[in-house]
Image (spheres, rainbow, N blue to C red):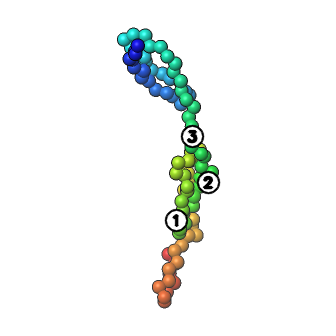
Amino acid sequence: MHVYGELSGTLSKGLTLQGSLSAPQTIEGQLTIPNAILPPSYEGPYEVTPSETEQTLSTEFLYMTGDITINPIPNNYGLITYNGVTITVS
């Protein structure tokens, strides 16, 4: 015998299920909440300072435990160009 019903609600961060259960008849069974399987943790730096070369934080498919901080461009940063005659620092 199949009994059809509906369970609706939300699962909060503290793993408490809140909501309502409605059915035309009695619903029997067991509600289980499996443990979350997290991806591997990101072990790289969480702080980056801009530079003249591209930087990649390899975070794809990894679980991160904090925010990434991007530092301001250092005060002593300058772009040096040479056109064959003149050196320019900007």
On the image, the x and y values in percent for residue 76 come to 58, 70
In this rendered view, identify the residue nearer to me: 40 or 19: 40
Residue at the farthest bottom position: 85
Residue 69, position as x, y percentages in the image: 56, 53
Secondary element type, mark 2: loop
* Vertical comparison of 59 with 75: above or below: above
Q: How many marks?
A: 3
What's the residue at 51%, 74% (across, down)?
79
Please identify the residue farthest to the right as the structure is shown.
43
Q: Residues within 10 Å of mark 3 (few under 14, many from 20)?
A: few
Q: CA distance from mark 1 to mark 2?
A: 16 Å
Point out which mark residue 54 bears: 1
Classify residue 40 as left or right of residue 19. right
Q: Quadrant of the N terminus?
A: top left
Up-down relation of residue 7 to residue 44 (above or below) = above
**Badge nearest the viewer, 3 or 1:** 3
Write the residue at 59% across / 52% down. 46
Which percent across, then down, holds residue 16? 53, 24
Tags 3 and 1 in contact by the CB under 8 Å rule? Answer: no
Label located before the other in sequence (1 or 2):
2
Q: CA distance from mark 2 to mark 3?
A: 17 Å
Which residue is identified by label 2?
Answer: 44
Q: Are marks 1 and 2 in contact (CB under 8 Å)?
A: no
**51 in relation to 84, above or below:** above
Residue under pointer 3: 38
Q: Amino acid at mark 2?
A: Gly
Which residue does the image show at 59% across and 45% down from the upper left? 40
Alpha carbon of mark 3 to alpha carbon of mark 1: how far? 29 Å
Q: Position of residue 56 (x, y in %)?
A: 54, 59
Mark number, residue 17: none
Amino acid type assigned to the residue bearing label 1 in the image: Glu
Residue 34 found in image quarter: top right
